[in-house]
Amino acid sequence: MTAPTTTAPESAPESAPESAAAPKALYVYGIAPAGIRTPRSRGVDGAPVRLLTEAGLCAAVSAAPPRLRPRRRDLLAHQAVLDELAEQGPVLPMRFAVLSPRTDTLLTQLRSDAAHLTQQLDGVRGCVELNVKGTVVPGHFADLVRRDDRLRTLALQTRRRPDYEANVRLGEAIALGVRREARRAAREVVDRLAPLAVRTVQGATDDEQVLSASFLLRSADEARFREAVAERARACGDRLALSVTGPLPCYSFVDPRPASPAGR
Amino acid sequence: MITYDDEVVCAPRAGTLYDVLELILDRGMVIDVFVRVSLVGIEILKVDARIVVASVDTYLRFAEACNRLDLEHDVRSKTVPEMFGSPVAKTVGRAGARRTARSLTDKVRDVLAPEHEEAAEAEARTRERAERPRSRPAARPRGEDDRPRSRPRRRTETEDE
C-alpha cells in the first residue's frame, strides 16, 4: 500500500533546482489555515499526504502519480483527504486532478495570494455544504392523467384505438407531464431551502435528475435544514425523490479560479 | 445527530461516489498556475452517472399503466407506486432515493421490465383495494403506512473500479 514518494514527474522542468524540495509535480487536495493535522488518509494513487505551509496557510499535497486517471479509488481518496481537512475547520477544496508543477510554484502561490485565499477561507468558516438531489417519481401520474384534460382525452382515445404509435404518444405525453411536475416540485424545494442557507448553487439537471443544488449552511443550521428537506420530501414524495449528501467540503462555494497570479 | 435518516435518505457523511462525483469533477478550486490534468475517460464517467431515461420503453410502460387506470370513475384506483412495481414504491415510501448509476439502472430496468410481476401486481391491487381504499394518491397518509413491506435493499457500496 505504501506508494513510492519518488514518482517520476511529468511536467517538472529540469531547470531551477530547488534546495529544499525536489522539483516534482504535486497533487493538490486543498488549502487550509496553517496549523492543522496532516490527514491520515492515503491520497491519490495511495501516496501519503503531507502539508506545505506558507504565509499562514497550508496546502495538502501528495506526490503526483505518473499517470492520473479518474479511477474510483482515486476519486474517493481525493474526497477522503478533503473530508479529513474539513473536519478540522475551513478548507478550500481543489477540483480533482489539479497539480502544481513544482513545490516552489505552490508556495509562491500561497504567499502571493494569501489575502485572497484567507478571505475565501473566512467565507466558508463554520459552514458545510449539503447537496440535495431530486429525481423524478411518477407516483402522482394517475392523478395527473385525471386532472389534465389533454392527457385524459389522449388516454381515452388510446384505449378505444390501441396501437403502438398511440401508446408511444400517450406514454411520452405522460412522461413529459410527470417530469414537468417534478421540476415544479424541485423549484418549490429550492424556494423553501434557500432561505436556510448562506448561499445556494444549482447544478446541472437532466430528464431524470431534475434537482441538484448545493447549499452552504452554517453547521448549526444543518439539523434544521435536514428537517426542512424531510418535510419537503414528505410533501412532494409522489413527484420528486429527494436525497441529501453531506456535510461536504465546500466544493461549490469557493471561487473556482482565484484571479491573482503568482507573479512568477 | 442522526435525526431524519430514516425518512429521508441521508447519505452517510461522504455520500456515495456518484453523489459527489459532479462536485469533485466540476466544482472546487482550480488555480491558474497549477495544472489541471486532462482526464481521459472522464466524459464516459459522467455519462455513466447520468443515464437519461426517456425512451420508447418508458413511454410504453407509462401507456400500459395508464391503460389500466380507471378513468371513468375517479375513485378507488390504486395508487401509482404499486402500479409501477416495487422500486418506485420503495423510493416514494422512503421519500428519497439513492441515486447511483446502478440504482438508477436497476430502477429503470425494474420499472420497465416487470413482466414477472403481473400476477403479484394484480394480487397486490386486490389487497390494496380491500385494505386501504383511498381516493387520490395525493391523499396518501404519510410515514409508516407508506413503507414498503420489505425494506428497500441497502445498496452496499462495493462497486468495482
Image: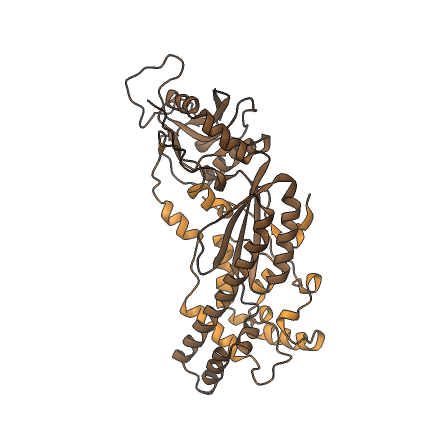
Chain colours: A brown, B orange
Between B151 and B47, the one nearer to me in the picture: B47
Q: Position of residue A188 (x, y in %)?
A: 56, 59
Between B146 and A152, the one nearer to me in the picture: A152
Q: Is residue A130 above or below residue B50?
A: above
Drawn side of residue B49 relative to residue A17, left or right: right
Q: Is residue B16 above or below residue A15?
A: below
Q: Is residue B155 visible to us here?
A: no
Q: Position of residue A31 (x, y in %)?
A: 48, 29
Q: Residue furthest top?
A: A19
Between A31 and A139, the one nearer to me in the picture: A31
Say which quadrant the N terminus of chain B sits in.
top right
Between B34 and A225, the one nearer to me in the picture: A225
Residue drawn at the location 41% of the way across and 67% of the way down: B55
Say which quadrant the C terminus of chain B sits in.
top left
Residue drawn at the location 57% of the way across and 74% of the way down: A143
Q: Is residue B24 above or below residue B10?
A: above
How many labels were placed on the picture?
A: 0
Q: Position of residue B14 (x, y in %)?
A: 56, 41
**Where on the picture, by quarter, is residue A231?**
bottom right
Q: Is residue A262 visible to us here?
A: yes
Q: Position of residue A18 (x, y in %)?
A: 35, 14
Drawn side of residue A28 relative to residue B88, left or right: left
